Amino acid sequence: MAGPQIVAVASGSPAQRAGLQPGDEVLTIAGESPRDVIRWQLLSNGTQVALEIKRQEDFFSVLISKRDGEPLGAEVNTAVFDGVQTCDNHCEFCFVHQLPRGMRRSLYLKDDDYRLSFLYGNFTTLTRFNELDYERVISEQLSPLYVSIHATDPDVRAAILQNRRGAVSLRWLRLLLDAGIEVHGQVVVCPGVNDGAVLESTLAGVLERFAELRTLCVVPLGLSRYNRQPRMRLHTRSEAEAVVDLVEGWQLRFLQVLGRRLAFLADEYYLMSGRNFPNINHYEGFDMHEDGIGMARAFQSQFMTQGQKPTPPRSGFFAWADGAPADGYRAPRHGSAASGAVSVKLSKRHVARDAPAAVLTGTLGAAVVSPLVASLDRSDVRVLPVQNQFFGGNIGVTGLMVGSDVARVLAEQPEGDRYLLPDVCLSRGRFLDGTSPQELPRRVEIVSTHGQALRDALERN
């Protein structure tokens, strides 16, 4: 197993004072070859940290002195040093199987690694979880974790995962809950497969067997135009309404029995069924805001309420892990702050601060943003929905907008206007299709995906 490679050293940090350099390979830390950045953090917490380093062909030891708990100040190239535990399920709704060719390689990796569940908030099915994994989670208190449930009936779950171990792997969920590990669950609802009576049975099974779950997210499957699974299809409106009615009925039961709602519907269900979003208190703290649970209601509240702080991301280890490289939705966006915008200049042509403004957003996001913009009663602000032709299907969330689709929409818009682009569709400054905002045909301003940030940007007109 190769050790982690240092890719950046913070100025003035203990790592820099000790002479560490980008390119150094860390063979051991505190005498141990760490498996991942979780172990890296735990081993580097003391005041004296010994490392074995390989620099090109040279090997040497380094003793770093620092304050207890002070970060080393060295960023490594990956979060998992011994290889990601890949997924051996074959879920028909898996979005990785619905990606077009030619995207960056990392997007095609299917993981089922409990460490990435802890680090990033990825969902794991626990089908590859074992006794050693369980012992480590308990001993190091790796909490919270995120578990894909989909169905509590063993046969139905095995059929959904297309993996016979899916019938029994929820036993690990029971053991994790018994040990006090905080777990968030998820059910991806596929029409005609695990909705209706199956979903009813799943919610009953959660109450009977897994009532200690922190939350249970009920989300619709996402289908791109590259889907090749004949059983997978979009919800009809009546099916979406039935899911909303069923889950809301169970929320009342959970409230009566547990004193909390436990199960929450993704925002898409309210949009698909034409229902209003619940009030703020309904979401009980927005624990699964990043999974699309209450994101629309939070955005509305932020937009309408001056001074409200951003809704925090779910509490993963990356909120404090030293040296952990961000990825996925935790990757650095474009440098925009919690409020305000960053302008991406594409030409020397000046854009006046009082120029008309247009808000770029996905088709689902437009359903949320348009009424908010209309409430401003301003003729100089408009919403530009971006139809997702890159993925197609029912993909309309703003976070999956790609540069080619944004460029298509902007090419038909006048020059000289202000175009506001939410940072949620960027990862390390690039869209999912690999393009950058600098390649767009109009200058854009990157705005934090937060209601107050959008309002602040619009009020600068």
Image (cartoon, grey):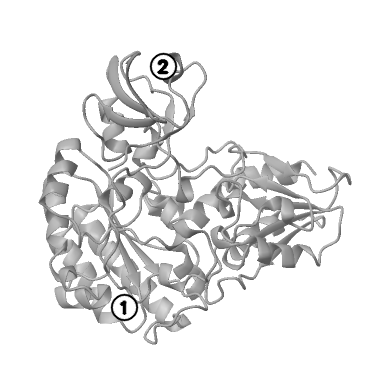
Residue with the mark numbered 2: 14
**Residue 286 in sight in this render:** yes
The answer for how far apart the CA atoms under marks 1 and 2 are is 54 Å
- Indicate the quadrant where residue 312 lies: top left
Depicted 129 relative to depicted 69: above or below: below
Checking the image for residue 245, the label placed there is: none
Residues 418 and 24: in front is 24
**Residue 214 in sight in this render:** no
Residue with the mark numbered 1: 195
Residue type (three-letter) at the residue carrying disc 2: Pro
Residues 437 and 56: in front is 56
Residues 393 and 284: in front is 393
Residue type (three-letter) at the residue carrying disc 1: Asp
Q: Position of residue 282 (x, y in %)?
A: 39, 54
Instruction: Kindly indicate whether the residue at mark 2 contacts the one at mark 1 (C-beta within 8 angstroms).
Output: no
Q: Position of residue 131 (x, y in %)?
A: 10, 51
